[in-house]
Image: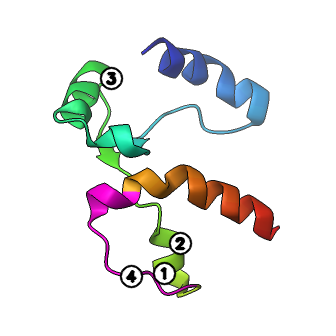
Amino acid sequence: KRTIEYYSNHAEHAHGADAKIDEVLLTGGDANLAGLATYLASSLGVPVRMADPFQLFRQNRIFHIPPLHHNRSLAFTTAIGLALRGLR
């Protein structure tokens, strides 16, 4: 909660960005913890959902993504980010 408050108070000044946080995206394998999204949404007062690490690939059909349950796909978030960094 303190991180969201800090961001809300400093983002617009530091980055010229809108300081309002509309939602929180959970990533990584621990995003699958039972009740985590509900707890965070209640505590933070903003909607919380699990991110889709393969969304960009599916939208742009960059690579073939084999069928994978969404909960398992969250564990690939870090690897996907590192791979995308290497494509620059």
Q: Which is closer to the viewer, label 4 or label 1?
A: 4
Residue that label 1 marks: 59
Where residue 52 appears, x then y in whole percent?
Answer: 40, 61
Question: In the rendered structure, are the residues bearing label 1 and label 3 in contact, judged by CB atoms less than 8 Å apart?
Answer: no
Q: Is residue 21 visible?
A: yes
Question: In the rendered structure, are the residues bearing label 3 and label 2 in contact, judged by CB atoms less than 8 Å apart?
Answer: no
Where residue 30 appears, x then y in whole percent?
Answer: 35, 37
Disc 4 element:
loop
Quadrant in the rendering for residue 24: top left
CA gap between label 1 and label 2 equals 5 Å
Residue that label 4 marks: 66
Query: Callout 2: few (<14), some (14-19), or many (20+) C-alpha neighbours within 10 Å?
Result: few
Q: Is residue 70 magenta?
A: yes
Question: In the rendered structure, are the residues bearing label 3 and label 4 in contact, judged by CB atoms less than 8 Å apart?
Answer: no
Front in this rendered view, residue 47 or 75: 75
Say if 29 sits above or below 67 in the image.
above
Q: Which is closer to the viewer, label 2 or label 4?
A: 4
What residue appears at the point 56 percent right and 23 percent down from the top-left corner? 8
Question: In the rendered structure, are the residues bearing label 1 and label 2 in contact, judged by CB atoms less than 8 Å apart?
Answer: yes
Residue that label 2 marks: 56
Describe residue 63's horizontal placement relative to residue 13 as left or right. left
> Which label sits on residue 44?
3
CA gap between label 4 and label 1 equals 14 Å
- Give, as a three-letter code, the residue at label 2: Leu
Say if 17 sits above or below 72 in the image.
above
CA gap between label 1 and label 3 equals 30 Å
Describe residue 69's horizontal placement relative to residue 86 as left or right. left
Front in this rendered view, residue 78 or 17: 78
- Give, as a three-letter code, the residue at label 3: Leu
Mark found first going from the N terminus, 2 or 4? 2
Query: Callout 3: few (<14), some (14-19), or many (20+) C-alpha neighbours within 10 Å?
Result: some
